[in-house]
Amino acid sequence: MHSSDIESIYDVLVIGSGAAGLAAALAAVKRGKKVALLEASSHIGGTSVFSGGQAWIPNHHYSELVKIADSPKDAADYLRACSPNRTTENDEQRRLAFVENAPKMLRFIEENTPLSFAPNAYPDVFAEWVGGRAGGRNVEAVPFNPGDIHGKRKLLRYPPSINRFNAPLTWTELHSLLGSPFRTLIKLMPVILSRWMQGKISGSRALIAGLFSGCIESGVEFFVNTPAKKLTIVDGTIRGVTAYRNDIPVEIRANDGVILACGGFDWNDELKQTFLPGKIEFPACIHSNIGDGLLMAMAAGAKTEHLDEAWYWAGFRDSNYFYQGAPLGSLLSNLRAYPHTIIVNKQGRRFGNEATLNFGYAMQECDENGNLKNLPCWSIFDHQFRRKYNAMEARIHPLLPLPKWVKKYASIEELADDLEINLSTLKNTLTQFNENARQGLDPEFDRGEGAYDRCYGNPHSAHPNLGTVEKAPFYAVEVKTTSLSTKGGPVVNSKSQVVHKDGDALQKLYAIGNVADCIMYYGCSGGDSLGPGMTAGYIAGNAIGST
């Protein structure tokens, strides 16, 4: 492609090719709009490809298949519970818009792409809260063969192996590997081989491939290696963008408007230092997330909110693990949720429920001086774990040599001395934890009490999440802060329009996905970025040119 490939005038410009941007482009083109999608990197898919591919869609049309009774009211109540710091009338209108449009978006995607979806048993993180559900709200793409997508399949981004290997398995099938991966994997091999032979893909790869295919079939034009850097503003109205092709600026007009869908700012050190009180040591998202959308919106006078928030995770760093040259963090799951493990800080104290999705937030807690009080921290496990369990994400298995990021110690005293952890406090922590674990309890942080905790525990243990840490030798993995994306940005209204600092909607500018201010504070479930992002894209694509 060359600069001349891009025409000077379109109806709609979408900036960013994750699931939200693709949904927006598809919705707009299906309304008869001439749509171009500009992607800053070399491939299509964005951070969405790094996900598990699930979308959190309450009250979807497959609810009966998983035998759950859902309702718009319960979904809205649950979102309110997950968003204690989002209490404005605009916040409420955005919640209601999501609840109303999410099921419509799902049907629209199925009707206009090769995708079909299936629900699974993934629970809401806070299933026990008002409006929560213990499973069934998440949907994922049914494995399929996307073909060559009119010769453009090579443009699809291939996901890194974060917490998964790239076999064509659904979440339900991958989840069945917990506890006995080798035995279950043998059972699944015929399925894997059959899908490989049929060219089928699953998860995030299937989701993005299906959306991309639908967009191509419908006439959306795609341009990779084309970062948009500046909005064209005439008389207070967005008229297009300045993008770059081979370092040459290209002016592109958008008659109906621009939809920003270009992710967060995890890889922009200056923006992180300015806005985030916490720390993201090794992001687990695409390295083109440098905040271009935020900067463009701010330059246009956008009101911003919650720039101090991110989808924080607990992870670790394999020094040999890079994605297209970027040093990614890897996400921890088994080493947080399984029995015979705890996570402690330098003082030797636990500081949260390790098994919950939101444990990464506890790692970001600051003291009165603004310093992160729980870093550094370590996941500590013992011989019982080493003998019986595996941690797939960290490549720890009883039959395999320990990877280099795992340290082994003959005693807890040796561990504390080497890691400079307060020994007395650590011993007290272990004594109390072990006494409670023998009873299947965690009165300090309620680990194992929720459906989400148990979902990621070991199903073959006496308790899926709790077991003593007392049998030498002991092992430690330093836990690093990571993120799937930042989640603050320009404020948008219920139509996904960006709001100006004066309170009015910016004419012809929309923001969706992680570039925009998120509708929730706590992570409410897996897929709580994809579901709302795709829905916001559907809303924006239908609204642009008519608002």
Image (cartoon, helix red, strand yellow):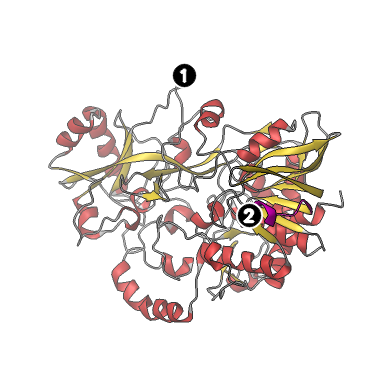
Q: Residue at x 19, y 36 (%)?
A: 415
Mark 2 to mark 1 CA distance (whole Å): 54 Å
Dot 1, how many residues are within 10 Å of its Cα: few (below 14), some (14-19), or many (20+)?
few
Camera-nearest residue between 257 and 24: 257
Q: Tell me which amino acid carries mark 1.
A: Glu
Dot 2, how many residues are within 10 Å of its Cα: few (below 14), some (14-19), or many (20+)?
few
* Residue 384 visible in the snapshot: yes
| Side of 170 relative to 320 (left or right) | right
| Side of 122 relative to 6 (left or right) | left
Camera-nearest residue between 299 and 81: 299
Residue 479: x and y in percent read 34, 40
Q: Which residue is mark 2?
A: 2
Under circle 1, the secondary element is loop
Under circle 2, the secondary element is loop
Report if residue 303 lies within the magenta region.
no
Name the image quarter holding the N terminus: bottom right
Camera-nearest residue between 352 and 309: 309
Which residue is the extreme one toward the top? Answer: 369
Q: Which residue is mark 1?
A: 368
Specify the quadrant of the image occupied by residue 265.
Answer: top right
Residue 133: x and y in percent read 58, 58
Q: Nearer the viewer, mark 2 or mark 1?
A: 2
Q: Which residues are magenta?
A: 1-10
Report if residue 6 lies within the magenta region.
yes
| Side of 246 relative to 389 (left or right) | right
Residue 78: x and y in percent read 64, 49
Q: Tell me which amino acid carries mark 2.
A: His
Q: Residue at x 41, y 40 (%)?
A: 282
Residue 193 numbered tag: none
Which residue is the extreme one toward the left? Answer: 410
Residue 213: x and y in percent read 63, 69
Label 2 vs 1, first from the N-terminus: 2
